Amino acid sequence: MIPEPLDLSGLRTYSLYGRPSKVTVGHFARPVPPGSSIRRLLSSLPDQLLGHDFPELIHRLAAVHRAGRPLIVGMGAHVIKVGLNPVLIDLMERSIITGLAMNGACIIHDAEIAMAGYTSEEVGSVLGDGSFGAAQETGAFLNGAINAGADQGLGLGAAVGAALLAGNFPHNDQSLLATAARLGIPATVFVAMGTDIIHIHPSASGAAIGATTHHDFRVFCAQIAQLQRGAYLNIGSAVLLPEVFLKALTLVRNLGHQVDHFTTANFDFLKQYRPLTNVVNRPTAGGGKGYHITGHHELMIPLLAAALLDELASEDEPTKPGGDASRLPDRAPLFSLLSF
């Protein structure tokens, strides 16, 4: 049987004007006039989703730097391959980034940039004949640096950075590892054996790679032990660095270090399990806050750097275009001082 249409005349209603609502005109974006600063652009964003979270993250990172607390960047090699070394180097030279953590692919692309000014071969065109990854200079230099570093009791990142400086390569100024060595910034490298092209070269030593990368894990743990009221950013590492970060965090807590209030953020193209769980959510469950920023690195990281520098350059809340901000609708105080 076909039922009779439901009678709607008895529906209970309420007043729109008394109903709690998640979106108000105070949350809306504001037009940005030509010539505006990055800071004014952020203040004009809609106070929703990333429009709220990104300015809030910038403010927290600025507070970290002003307080002299650490800001550590963990990263995958894609960050280098899309050309972001100069952006990170600038933040290192300004003492904003206080530590780098990398996967093994980073040292390959970073060293090739320093040595030759280019990197990232076309895998599809060389895999068929077995020549992928067989660049003689890359394997010889990096394995030589790692082997020497093991003999000297150095970490992998410090060993490669020192070798780059000693080599006086033409593009050392574009190298993260050379810059870290020059500035005395800890740069740690975490290797999964067999994942990097230099492991196929005859000069590779599993003992040296293991010793130097384990040394770096201990250095990284010492940095994480000081992370209270600091910040950790994971940029483009979907598995390795999130796992290393979580293990380092549990180790230092086990040893009695108080690391329970800090800021984390993950930057990547997609939301993935390990970064969300091991960087954004679990570590900050007891205090602080984690953020996930989805987007292209070549856009989001320069925006992050520019917004952070703009924020650090001014102590004042940005006024809204057109005059007195008090005449505009209320919105969440994105730039008020946050309690960690």
Image (cartoon, grey):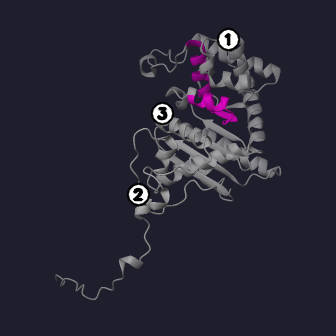
The residue depicted at 49 percent of the width and 36 percent of the height is: 297
Is residue 88 in the magenta section? yes
Closer to the observer: label 3 or label 2?
2
Q: Residues within 10 Å of mark 2 (few under 14, many from 20)?
A: some
Q: Amino acid at mark 2?
A: Phe
**Circle 1 sits on which residue?**
168
Q: Amino acid at mark 3?
A: Glu
Q: Residues within 10 Å of mark 1 (few under 14, many from 20)?
A: few
Closer to the observer: label 2 or label 1?
2
Q: Which residues are magenta?
A: 87-116
**Circle 3 sits on which residue?**
298
Q: Is residue 159 left or right of residue 335?
A: right
Give whichever of 24, 85 is nearer the camera: 24
**Magenta stretch: helix, strand or loop mostly:** helix
Give yes or no for contact between labels 3 and 1 (Cβ–Cβ under 8 Å).
Answer: no
The residue depicted at 75 percent of the width and 40 percent of the height is: 223
